[in-house]
Image (cartoon, coloured by chain):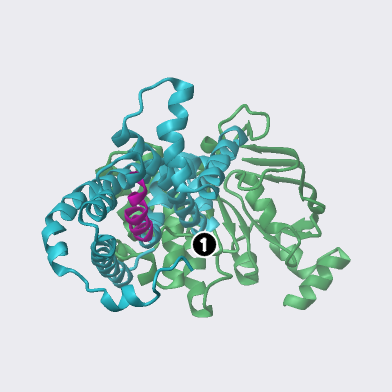
Chain colours: A green, B cyan
Amino acid sequence: MVEVKQLHKSFGDLHVLRGIDLEVKKGEVVVIIGPSGSGKSTFLRCINHLEQPSSGEIHIDGGNLDDGSVDINLIRRTAGMVFQQFNLFPHLTALQNVCLAPTKVLNMPVAEAEELGRELLKKVGLADKEAAYPQQLSGGQQQRVAIARALAMKPKLMLFDEPTSALDPEMIGEVLMVMKELALDGMTMLVVSHEMGFAREVADRIVFMDEGLIIEEGEPSEFFSNPKHERTKAFMSKIL
Amino acid sequence: MDGRPLGEGAALFKFDLGVVARYLPFLVRGVGITIEFTLISFLLAIVLGLVIALGRISKNRFVRIPCQIYIDFIRGTPLLAQVYLVHFGLPQIFGYKPVGFIDALIALTLNSSAYMAEIYRAGIESIEAGQMEAARSLGMTYGQAMRYVILPQTIRRVIPPMGNEFITLLKESSLVSVIGMEDLMMRAKMMAGRSFRPFEAYFTSALIYLAMTFTFSRVLGRVEGRLKVSGRG
């Protein structure tokens, strides 16, 4: 589904990603953890080209993003993205947020898009909020709308960039619940998160990043109970 | 001192309301032309300004740099020079016959477009980067993201500064009188010449400009108030 080879990314002198190799299989849920500044978010943003990689290869669903063989806009449709700050469109209602891309990008008829939008809002538990504007919704509700919005493009892969970091604690659960259901539906997911409970329960694999490199990866049970690398151990001792 | 007794004029001066009353209809006929110039060039600048603003923020430098130069040139030179340039200068190069009305409109439009472009640019750049990223991550092209996500949010933010630009334009349109347009300013000049009462002429015309800008800024204030109440985005 996703294959990343020797991915490097620099911002000027700052070498943020220093050779990432990662493969994600269809239906797999991979949670990326690591200290802040380790390049987790940058890595995720490179995958759908919100950041331009400095070098390396990214294959999504067979197409290479960097050799010009595929349209980046097409790849971005394949990979839905959920942001830390939600980034809902404030001038549109919840339903319009969800329907915008299908109608404009996929040329879906409005009625069909609205039907899809309502279905997705129902799926994230917000069927009654379709007419609400983002600022009328709580953070947790906004993030769930954002997930519905990403799903409306029928992505094959979902990228979550710290989806619960900007939320009040009591709202984190509702968002994680939606993500968990998504995982159970078989969605391929790449999640940057500090939610260890979620990682332990839902992830098929944990990836630990530090200083722009993948230090260690493994199944959650193994990873949490028996981290091998010193830096992983140090990190785990701080957060658990 | 040229021998004119100081203070005497002031002491004898009487504001001649009769002259004002006589010439008021004559002055007011210029108001139409002033408003016409202001409105047409404002509407054209709304469109042209957006085009230039989009060019100014383009990643393509062959688009961006000319737009930047255009904005810098217009904002860094006097409108009066621009009016003369369009009316007298460019016909010399391109060989067209100068037509005052059209040249005045062109000069005002070109001038206002540069200011308008900067208003749009400030508005667009005030939208959080996350909006563009979210739109692009949904597969929208840059153009689609601009059209459906960024610009609708920008419009609310650019309305107040555009209102100010309209007021500026209304006042600056008085410069078209130098190429013979019979706007309010020109008629004030004519009134001064015919009546030998320049103070009455220019003061009255100034008050008419004030009445127009004051009325408009009150209307603008209301629109802004309404935008704040329903403030979405």
Which is more toward the observer, A39 or B79?
B79
Question: Chain ID for label 1?
Answer: A
**Residue at horizontal 76 percent and vertical 70 percent from the top:** A225
Q: Is residue A177 above or below residue A14?
A: below
Q: Is residue B200 left or right of residue A188?
A: left
Label 1 packing within 10 angstroms: few (<14), some (14-19), many (20+): some
From the viewer's perspective, tell me whether residue B233 is left or right of residue A74: left
Q: Is residue A222 above or below residue B44?
A: below
In depth, the one of B6 and B148 nearer the eye is B6
- Give the quadrant of the C terminus of chain B: bottom left
- Give me the residue at 58% from left, 30% from top: A70
Image coordinates of residue A133 in percent, x first then y, are: 34, 65
Name the one closer to the observer, A184 or B113: B113
Residue A154 in magenta stretch: no
Q: Foreground: A174 or B41?
A: B41
On the image, the x and y values in percent for residue A50 come to 61, 47
Queried whether the magenta region covers residue B172, the answer comes back as yes
Q: Main secondary structure of the magenta part?
A: helix
Q: Which residue is farthest front?
A: B3
* Residue B65 in the image, given as x and y percentages of width and height: 60, 38
User: What segment carries the magenta color?
Assistant: B162-176
Identity of the residue drawn at 12% across and 63% down: B21
Q: Is mark 1 on a helix, strand or loop?
A: helix
Q: Kindly tell me whether residue B58 is visible in this rendering.
A: no
Residue indicated by mark 1: A180
Point 32% across, 45% down: residue: B177
Residue A233: name its quadrant.
bottom right
Q: What residue type is labelled 1?
A: Lys
Give the quadrant of residue B63. Answer: top right
